[in-house]
Amino acid sequence: HIFERFAEAVIKAPEVLECHMVVGGFDYLVKARISEMAAYQDFLTRVILPLPGVKETHTYASIGDVKPDALLPV
């Protein structure tokens, strides 16, 4: 199953901090910590792009934190 293969790949990838299945214009939102653009290109070509069902990716780089921690009250 395509979604299961994607989930397995991102779970194994140490660069991935979070991964969310979403509704809308794409299926997954992946938050990854990558040291530089060359490492990001490697991550894409090694982990994401070879997966079946991946037709395109969109990249958004964070340039600053507005609200970095969203701790819920207990």
Image (cartoon, grey):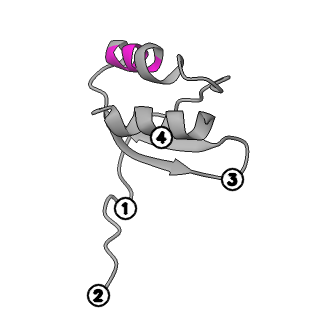
Q: Tell me if mark 1 has few (under 14), some (14-19) or many (20+) residues whose alpha carbon lies within 10 angstroms of its own.
A: few
The magenta-colored residue range is 39-44
- Name the residue rendered at 53%, 16% in the picture: 50
Q: Tell me if mark 3 has few (under 14), some (14-19) or many (20+) residues whose alpha carbon lies within 10 angstroms of its own.
A: few
Closest to the observer: 13 or 40? 13
Instruction: Indicate which disc, 3 or 4, sits on the residue closer to the N terminus.
Output: 4
Residue 61 screen position, x and y as percent: 44, 34
Give the SS element for disc 3: loop
Q: Which mark is residue 7?
A: 4
Can residue 43 be found in the magenta stretch? yes
Residue, disc 1: 67
Mark-to-mark CA distance, 1 and 4: 27 Å
Considering only vertical position in the picture, is 69 above or below 50? below
Would residue 10 appear left or right of 22 to someone viewing this image? left
Residue 6 screen position, x and y as percent: 51, 34
Mark-to-mark CA distance, 1 and 2: 19 Å
Residue, disc 2: 74
Give the SS element for disc 1: loop
Q: Tag 1: residue type?
A: Lys
Q: Is residue 62 visible?
A: no
Give the SS element for disc 4: helix
Closest to the observer: 71 or 50? 50
Residue, disc 3: 23
- Name the residue rendered at 31%, 73% in the picture: 71
Can residue 12 be found in the magenta stretch? no
Considering only vertical position in the picture, is 46 above or below 21? above
| Displayed quadrant of residue 56 | top right
> Closer to the camera: disc 1 or disc 2?
2
- Name the residue rendered at 34%, 78% in the picture: 72
